[in-house]
Image (cartoon, helix red, strand yellow):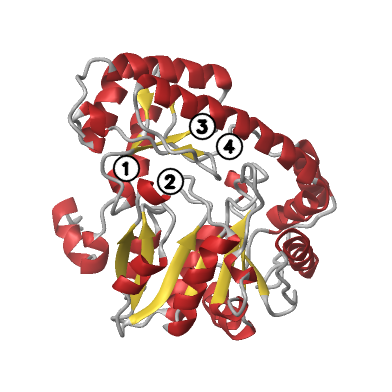
Amino acid sequence: MTVPSSSSMQRYLTETVRDIPPSGIRKFFDLVSASKDIISLGVGEPDFITPWRVREACVYGLEQGKTTYTPNSGLLELREEIASYLHKSFAVTYEPSNQVMVTIGGSEAIDLALRALVSPGDEVLVPEPSYISYSPIATLSGGKAVGIETSAKHQFKLQAEQLKQHITPKSKVLILCYPSNPTGGAMTYEDWLPIAKVVEENDLIVISDEIYAELTYGHKHVSFAAMPGMKDRTILVSGFSKAFAMTGWRLGYACGHPDLIAAMLKIHQYTVMCAPVMGQIAAIEALRNGLEEKDQMVESYNQRRRLVVKGFREIGLECHEPQGAFYAFPSIQSTGLSSEEFAQRLLQEGRVAVVPGHVFGKGGEGFVRCSYATSISQLNEALDRIGSFVSKFEKAPI
């Protein structure tokens, strides 16, 4: 039997998949995994482990023999907890029976939403810099991703005028992610009002990724779905990875209009059927009794946030103050290097891994993403190394 070579195998792949580049974050993660003495500020993952009470609930569930499929939309008990949590925390109300579905992480929820909504040629608006998956998933869904560049001048918040300028008759979906990965930008009620007006005037559907909603500093998260008139236009996506340190459990959810959730559920039931039951059992415990541990993690992130922002500014790198998530997004333009060159050389010469800003889309060039979800001692060492590295460069004209 003749085995096709790698090059000949490529011809079987769809043009769409061939043209999508691999993840820029994953590339740096792989480099770090293969090297020693590197401090990684690259991957967006809590350095805490899942609280014991949550892990214990999972173990106890297994001991009771809870190992079967669940309903496609997830355990009703979990959907009820999700609905209760969203109502108490963010003043949005959903009916657990038909407006909430449990997914394999927030990522699956976004994929399902786009596949349910996007027809060939539809445009998907994505404020950038943004989480790296939005535009590729929009493309894989048959749509056209349209980046909207946000800027440090506005703390990377989407401006209504910018949104208007990018809307065409083909615009259908707007993807929002606040608090933002990678910038840490967050939106207030007043920030959302003009955006909601544009959304309504142009009949857009919004996918609001609120995975970092619990990680805010000095203010409370405002859900876009809670804005007047926006609930039925919004698919609220979230999950347990960031707030409860449950990245490896891969458990998320989507909430929205019953017709949208029913459409997403059709795709979900034909592809993954349901999320793993043991993760769902753990998630029930996280929502019922894990919020206190979550608060302790947020306080720790806040301390690190202040340390990192102060450190970057002392080094001479401009850095806006992130209001949410656990990322700093300092400018490296004063070094005269591109963000890719900076990240590569810092990795090789300073043994610190960061992610170049250009992988997050428009407006990311000239910045790097640094996750501060690591220990204070590691952050101090990383700042020392970055300071030594940056001192090699004369300040470039800004």
Asked which secondary structure carries label 4, the reply is loop
Q: Point out which mark residue 46 bears.
A: 4
Image height check: is 48 above or below 232? above
Q: Earlier in the sequence, mark 1 or mark 2?
A: 2
Dividing the picture into quadrants, the one containing residue 12 is bottom left
Report how far apart the C-alphas of labels 1 and 4 lie in the structure. Answer: 20 Å
The C terminus lies in which quarter of the figure? top left
Residue 97: x and y, percent? Answer: 74, 78
* Disc on the earlier residue, 3 or 4: 4
Q: Residues within 10 Å of mark 2 (few under 14, many from 20)?
A: many
Q: Which residue is mark 1?
A: 357
Label 3, label 2: how far apart the Cα atoms are: 12 Å
**Tag 4 near tag 2, CB within 8 Å:** no
Amino acid type of the residue tagged 1 in the rendering: Gly
Residue 158 in the image, given as x and y percentages of width and height: 42, 60
State whether residue 187 is above or below residue 59.
below
Q: Looking at the figure, which quarter contains the N terminus?
A: bottom left
Label 1 vs label 2: CA separation? 8 Å
Q: Amino acid at mark 3?
A: Tyr
Query: Which element is circle 1 on?
Result: helix
Q: Are marks 1 and 2 in contact (CB under 8 Å)?
A: yes
Give coordinates of residue 129: x percent, y percent: 36, 52
Residue identified by numbered label 2: 182
Residue 119's label in the rendered image is none
Residue at image position (75%, 42%) is 55
Q: Decide which of 40, 277 is in the foreground and name it.
A: 40
